[in-house]
Image: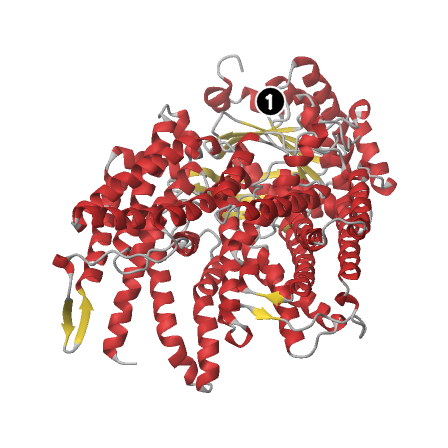
Amino acid sequence: MSIASPSVPAPAAAAAPAKRRPVVAIVLFALLALLPVAVSLGLPSHWLTLVTRAMIFAIAALSLDLILGVGGLVSFGHAAFVGIGAYATGIMITEGRGEALLILPVVLGLCALFAAVTGAVSLRTRGVTFIMITLAFGQMVYFLAQALSAYGGDDGLTLYERSTVLGFDVFKNRIGFFYVVLGVLVACYAVISVIVASRFGRVLRAARENATRVAVTGFHVGRIRLVAYIISGMIAGLSGFLLANQTEFVSPAYMSWPRSGELIFMVVLGGVGSLHGAIIGALAFLFAEDVLSGLTEHWKVIFGPMIVLFVLFTRGGLVGLMRKLGVGRHD
Amino acid sequence: MTEPVLVLTGVQKAFGALKVTDGVNLSVAPGELHALIGPNGAGKTTLVHQISGMLRPDTGSIRFKGQDVIALPPEKRARAGLARTFQITSTIPSLSVLENVALGVQARASHPLALFRNAARDESLNGPAWVAVEAVGLSDRAHVLAGRLSHGEKRALEIAMALTLEPAAILLDEPLAGVGREEGERLIALLRSLKGRYAMLLVEHDMEAVFALADTVSVLVYGRVIASGDPATVRADPAVREAYLGEEG
Amino acid sequence: MTTGLLIVQILNGLQLGILLFLVAAGLTLVFGVMDFINLAHGVQYMLGAYLAVTFVSLTGSFVLGLALALAAALVIGLALEFLVFRHLYERDHLDQVLATFGLILLLNQGVKMVWGAAPLSVPVPAFLAGNVALMEGILYPTYRFALIGAGLAVGALLWFVVEKTRTGMLLRAGASNAPMVSALGVDINKLFMIVFAFGTMLAAFAGAMAAPILSVEPGMGDNILILAFVVIVVGGIGSIRGAFVGALIVGLVDTLGRSFMNDLLRLFMSAPSARAAGAALSSMLIYLVMAIVLFVRPEGLLPAKGRA
């Protein structure tokens, strides 16, 4: 029998999430909600764009934290879902079907299908193999996007308008769009938190630490992981929908494997499994990227070693660091 | 004569040229405590893995509650009421004692994988879990993380987890191994309290415990059962003394 | 589709397969023996190519340049092992993935800074220039034949070392059960370093040999890496035999797929649709093959003995 063994050990002395008070998340959301106010008071509007983008990636990172942080599945192909969501959105807008209520079911459906099919294959494998397979499937989608010459191929596809919601151009206003994204972020956080604390979530968490024990208790570990994988993929697809609308552009780069690596880094940076850590990680990553790329064209030469040093010298990410400093203490 | 709960017939398994299970016949009646002893390397744990579904025998049959279970994966056997403990304790370290046990209760609940029902505060799960926790004497350690328990406490926890399956049979793989004297005595008392209520297959090295608890003893040497019967008879069997017990038998 | 074209494409597929084998062999050993996932392996392939560019142009000799490139690649590889990889063996896969990912970012960018972003190349050495006549009218570049030959030779050498020497035996034992080997008193650190050095050399050799026929550019290692992953997954982790078979399958399927998918699809659909669908399908083909193999045999086609 082969049950995928965990590539991610449980955080030391993790309190049951049910006891976790979402203080950090609430504070975070409150601060985010105030940003447009700050911008209207004089903060450069570049911040609005940057933070909107960061929140979109935070949604993707949250979805990854579900399977990686909670489930212990290191997926190196998560950007594929973001890309599928973005492309479905971009293609439908280009074809004149830009209504969000038409696009969203397509996005969610395609991502669920892709997750179900690739997950069914990948989840039969363990550790290192799983990582490689998810990477390979992600690449497959990337090549598929490159081959779509009708929709820009490698150069990408520029969108000439954004989605409408129930016929209204809600997304056109940058501040309105900001709050929509924030709303989606809060909703996703809430949903994923509930799932993690649920019966399903407990089994998923337990399986990461000891899949054998979970199996001999009477649970089908593979099926549980597949469901988590599908949910995670759909949420990431949702972030792709938002990304396409924000940038008004889709390109294969959205699902390149460096993007998948960056998503993993965001989750780890913030602190694996903590959920609000994924949000913090995404924000921190995008800020760092913004600052560094402003300094030099070759910023990856700085960023690469930063990642290496971060991995070598920290455990628990930013959330772990915060915990040590007494912020956001759990029971 | 009631139908045995667990029947192994002609079970064989080889790894390459090495026969780890060489035609084992064994049965456990309801309420019977059947001990399986044998020298190290005899293949006892491998046999338990085959009964619980983690390894597949090459040939032979394993019948549980009258049903052939060879093709069933571990989770299905667990649902059918076949529980086991592990030689190297296998719990969920970052969950508390109560939560570990509640996991077993959850498996048999009506919506075991509900996406939106909180697990930790669920009385319908915690209630029965408490009963099992108390039965094994871990009530005052119920909220301690399983990773922090002592060796003997982990063994007791595993037994509690087995009990939540409402099992028809429990496979116990060396529950006394590495446990100190005091905790060992408590575990033996616990096992004695379970006697008669469940069919139990007890793999053990601790001879005192085996002969104090067992209704039947089978001796496994190089994958074959060389003797089987009531404790006194087996103890006196010269083949057994030679192969395993030595002169002190 | 003529026989001549078919033969040429089969040879191209073999050539790609051999290249993939060289990259995958070292990688699969590292996975198998050290349970260490090294995303930066592709970068070692890339470094081999870039170093070949420099040393061949410095010395004017292909063979000398190749030798120097291998030596330099080995030094760099060992330096990386000492500075970074060594500290990751005990860490979980997630940390390994991230740290080696960081290395890829660093080295891809670093290479751009040192050599520039424009594609470079190595001239085909004079003694291997020209073509070989296979059949009437079918010519195949001599160099590509040499590459296939060199790769097979290295493969044979690898087979010899792994199957017939004591070190090889330890490697095979380690691939099935590393803790056991350590418990037997073998200096596991030295074994790891040897495995690692092997892998680095193989990848760099592949890169250097590929330099005359592929374009040398930043990021060239990334695609090869992912193909190597597919090879290893199809062949079975820790298995050199598996890597060989997997590499040939991947090389042939990919090459033949790309060449003939268009023609195949034209039997069913119009030319423009066939071209579009062909491009898409042929790039996805090996992944589909991988998925099918895994669905039937999750452990790969020829898994290392003793691994589940």
State the SS at label 1: loop
For the point 21% across and 49% down, the residue is C56
Asked whether, in this view, residue C112 is left or right of residue A207, the answer is left
For the point 56% across and 65% down, the residue is A251
For the point 19% across and 60% down, the residue is C143
Label 1 crowd bin: few (<14), some (14–19), many (20+), radius 10 Å: some
Query: How is the model colour-coded?
Result: secondary structure
- Residue sitting farthest toward the front: A42
Vertical placement of residue C301 versus C191, above or below: below
Vertical placement of residue A159 versus A34, above or below: below
Residue C81 is situated, as x and y percent measured from the top left of the image, at: 39, 34
Asked whether, in this view, residue C66 is left or right of residue B139, the answer is left
Q: Amino acid at mark 1?
A: Ala
Q: Chain of mark 1?
A: B
Q: Give the position of the C terminus of chain A as an image quadrant.
A: top right
Residue A99 is situated, as x and y percent measured from the top left of the image, at: 74, 74
| Pick the front one: C244 or A183 | A183
Residue at mark 1: B177
Asked whether, in this view, residue A249 is left or right of residue A187, the answer is left
For the point 49% across and 54% down, the residue is C298
Residue B241 shows in the view: yes
Residue C211 is situated, as x and y percent measured from the top left of the image, at: 28, 55
State the count of labels: 1
- The quarter of the displayed image where residue B34 is located: top right
| Pick the front one: A31 or B123 | A31
Vertical placement of residue A192 versus C129, above or below: above
- Residue sitting farthest toward the bottom: C270
Residue B115 shows in the view: no
Residue B107 is situated, as x and y percent measured from the top left of the image, at: 75, 46
Vertical placement of residue B246 versus A201, above or below: above
